[in-house]
């Protein structure tokens, strides 16, 4: 009898794997060709349009797991229905965006709404027990609401942020789900073990098609579902008021994506780039630039995540005694990543590097002023020729050109009508190219407004989009 739950959970894992793999195969054979992620010759460097509806089979498999748990554990729905409801909501928001973009603000408001609903249904962080000191605890009081909402919104966005390489977010989700199963085990919650095992099986089945080269992507629906599932389920992983240890386990297991997100915020803040603007300087991008293949980079990141997951589990197994070791390991990992992934070129020259970054920030803010002014010119100018004069002047002040010049490289900009136009900048390497692309993007609102008003801008190097390939055929191919 003692080993029966383990056998049952193994069978559930295998069943979830088969169900999700079958569902993913069916999605791949979808004749409607909806929810395709088109390559753009910038960050989306896959060769052909790829479905991004991978969250659907994962979602269906998870619902099946909830159904089995409801049959197996009396009272399961009484405790879990708020989590099930809000996971359905968060997946629906992401899935709709995968089919037809909703916009960042709509998605963010939807995430906050789902978090508020879960909080209102009494699933929250209220009373935290210190896992490192017996009997020590403190009440959050009025801070309970913002802390709970922050937790529920941050984790899905962290998972979505790292979903920039085939198999990365789904692999991390698999390790996190297995970690959550251990949390449920130590918390005496067999229903959580079962649901986490089902999610692990679903992600394993999905990885069959998502491992490089990916035949299908998670999409926002899948990334949001994984993140919100981890965040919401962790709130039920222990008795009410004693969940700090469980949250710490998840935080430690999320060490790689959390550090990556922190690096991105600091990097973009220093450069004057919007925090939510995608770039190609995440940890996995850095590993590829260092010479790792995609598969080797994934294995390296999986290995680090596995070690961190085991360290997080040790916090529960050793009842907090492993805390100093875990803290020191995460700190050393952060220092290693900052230095050897090239975020800091030299500790001795750190001040000079920060000064250089601040100079680039001033340059970016300067360019943003011209970008905004050019947008106003698109509204103010009486003719398209008058606007073109202002556009050329503004681009020139920012070091950009409408036509190729010596040592310049084309920078593709996707316009609102689906076409792609080229501007040119003096690109020296991949990092410099990313900065030029960020600068060129500042002029997108002006170009889109002008296209809407005059339909065509004489002298602008534009290639119309096609249903097969919306990217310019002559755009330079980048290294991945």
Image (tube, rainbow, N blue to C red):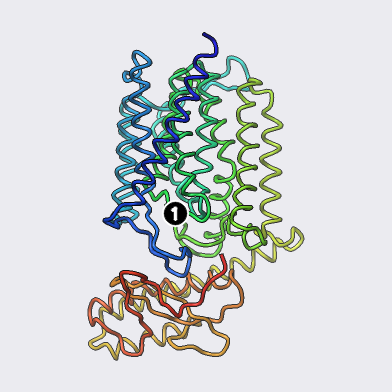
Q: Is residue 162 visible?
A: yes
Secondary structure under the numbered disc 1 in the rendered image: loop
Nearest to the observer: residue 242 or residue 156: 156
> In which quadrant will I find the C terminus?
bottom right
The residue at 46%/85% (across/down) is 401
Q: Residue 101 location, x and y as percent?
A: 30, 56
The residue at 50%/62% (across/down) is 279
The residue at 40%/38% (across/down) is 20
Image quadrant of residue 368?
Answer: bottom left
Image quadrant of residue 332?
Answer: top right
- Residue pointed to by mark 1: 215
**In the image: residue 439, left or right of residue 293:** left
Q: Residue 246 location, x and y as percent?
A: 53, 26
Q: Taking 244 as reference, is 98 above or below it? A: below
Residue at the far top in the pictured view: 1
Q: Taking 180 as reference, is 93 above or below it? A: below
Q: Taking 111 as reference, is 31 above or below it? A: below
The residue at 48%/23% (across/down) is 9
Nearest to the observer: residue 202 or residue 457: 202
Q: Residue 266 location, x and y as percent?
A: 56, 55
Q: Residue 443 location, x and y as percent?
A: 39, 75
Nearest to the observer: residue 263 or residue 50: 50
């Amino acid at each position: 009898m003692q080993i029966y739950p383990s056998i049952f959970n193994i069978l559930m894992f295998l069943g979830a794997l088969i169900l999700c793999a079958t569902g993913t195969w069916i999605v791949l054979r979808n004749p409607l060709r909806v929810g395709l992620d088109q390559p753009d010759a910038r960050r989306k460097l896959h060769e052909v349009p790829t479905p991004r509806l991978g969250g659907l089979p994962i979602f269906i498999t998870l619902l099946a797991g909830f159904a089995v748990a409801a049959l197996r554990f009396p009272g399961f729905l009484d405790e879990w229905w708020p989590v099930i409801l809000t996971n359905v909501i968060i997946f629906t928001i992401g899935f709709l965006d995968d089919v037809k973009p909703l916009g960042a603000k709509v998605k963010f408001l939807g995430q906050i709404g789902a978090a508020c609903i879960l909080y209102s249904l009494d699933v929250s962080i209220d009373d935290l027990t210190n896992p490192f000191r017996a009997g020590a605890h403190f009440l959050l009081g009025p801070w309970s609401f913002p802390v709970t909402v922050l937790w529920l919104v941050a984790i899905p966005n962290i998972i979505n942020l790292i979903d920039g390489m085939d198999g990365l977010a789904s692999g991390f989700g698999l390790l996190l789900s297995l970690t959550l199963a251990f949390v449920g085990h130590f918390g005496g919650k067999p229903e959580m073990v079962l649901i986490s095992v089902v999610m692990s099986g679903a992600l394993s089945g999905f990885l069959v098609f998502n491992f490089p080269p990916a035949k299908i992507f998670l999409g926002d629906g899948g990334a949001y579902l994984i993140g919100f599932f981890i965040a919401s389920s962790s709130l039920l992983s222990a008795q009410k008021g004693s969940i700090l240890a469980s949250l710490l386990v998840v935080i430690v297991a999320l060490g790689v994506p959390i550090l990556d997100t922190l690096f991105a915020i600091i990097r973009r803040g220093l450069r004057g780039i919007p925090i939510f603007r995608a770039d190609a300087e995440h940890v996995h991008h850095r590993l590829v630039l260092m010479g790792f293949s995609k598969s080797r980079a994934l294995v390296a990141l999986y290995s680090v995540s596995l070690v961190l997951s085991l360290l997080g589990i040790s916090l529960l197994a050793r009842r907090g005694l492993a805390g100093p070791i875990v803290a020191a390991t995460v700190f050393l990992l952060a220092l290693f990543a900052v230095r050897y992934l090239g975020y800091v070129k030299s500790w001795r020259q750190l001040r000079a590097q920060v000064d250089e970054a601040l100079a680039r920030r001033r340059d970016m803010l300067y360019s943003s002023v011209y970008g905004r002014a050019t947008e106003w010119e698109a509204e103010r100018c009486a003719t398209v020729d008058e606007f073109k004069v202002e556009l050329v002047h503004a681009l020139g002040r920012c070091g950009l050109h409408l036509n190729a010049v010596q040592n310049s490289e084309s920078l593709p900009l996707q316009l609102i009508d689906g076409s792609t136009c080229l501007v040119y900048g003096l690109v020296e390497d991949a990092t410099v190219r990313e900065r030029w692309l960020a600068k060129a993007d500042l002029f997108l609102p002006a170009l889109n407004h002008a296209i809407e008003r005059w339909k065509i801008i004489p002298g602008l190097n534009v290639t119309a989009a096609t249903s097969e390939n919306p990217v310019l055929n002559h755009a330079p191919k980048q290294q991945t």
